[in-house]
Amino acid sequence: QVQLAESGGKLVPAGGSLTLSCAVSGRTFTSSIIAWFRQAPGKEREFVGRIRWNNELDYYADNVKGRFTISRDSAKNTVYLQMNSLKTDDTGVYYCAASGNWGAHMAQQFDDWGRGTQVTVSS
């Protein structure tokens, strides 16, 4: 399996920027998709974006495309979610997850999850 650990969540003003980190380890992670999800209070877990570890191909949900960027640092075994122009709707618990399915974008397609980190965007 893949082990993941998110960090970096905090309170940030609307319009601001924040970068989250996901430390990744395990024997299969270099062949995996690493994705970010978020879950707001009272809402279902929502796909944010994903990256293919070995070639950095990325894909984003429409409501974050152009504002969020996923990248990875192979030397640090870390995936990042850079969030710009934050809105109050971006508030939620952010999770990173791993899947062996390179087309995965639904939560049920991901077997390995971090514990989540809270992001709160204030007005």
Image (cartoon, helix red, strand yellow):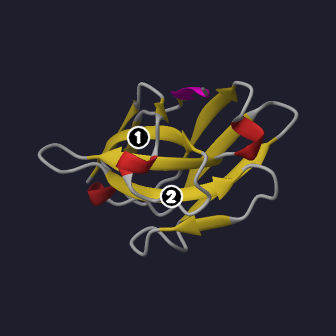
Residue position for label 2: 104
- Element class at badge 2: loop
Q: Name the residue located 64 percent from the left edge and 44 percent from the top edge.
A: 80
Mark 2: few/some/many CA within 10 Å (<14, 14-19, 20+)? some
In the image, which disc is placed on residue 38?
A: none
Q: Name the residue located 21 percent from the left edge and 50 percent from the top edge.
A: 44
Give the camera-side residue of 9 and 55: 55
- Element class at badge 1: strand
Number of numbered callouts drawn: 2
Q: Is residue 123 left or right of residue 57?
A: left
- Asked if the magenta segment contains residue 5, the reply would be yes
> Which region of the structure is painted magenta?
2-6
1 vs 2, front mark: 2
**Circles 1 and 2: CB atoms closer than 8 Å:** no
Residue position for label 1: 94
Residue 106 image point, x, y percent: 39, 56
* 100 versus 69 height, above or below: above
State which quadrant residue 79 falls in.
top right
Residue 118 image point, x, y percent: 36, 33
State which quadrant residue 70 falls in.
bottom right
Say whether residue 13 is visible.
no
Q: Residue furthest right?
A: 75
Give the camera-side residue of 16 and 65: 65
Q: Quadrant of the N terminus?
A: top right
Q: Quadrant of the C terminus?
A: bottom left
Q: Name the residue located 74 percent from the left edge and 45 percent from the top edge.
A: 31
Residue 108 image point, x, y percent: 36, 47
- Asked if the magenta segment contains residue 87, the reply would be no
Give the camera-side residue of 1 and 13: 1
Instruction: Specify the amino acid type for callout 1.
Output: Tyr
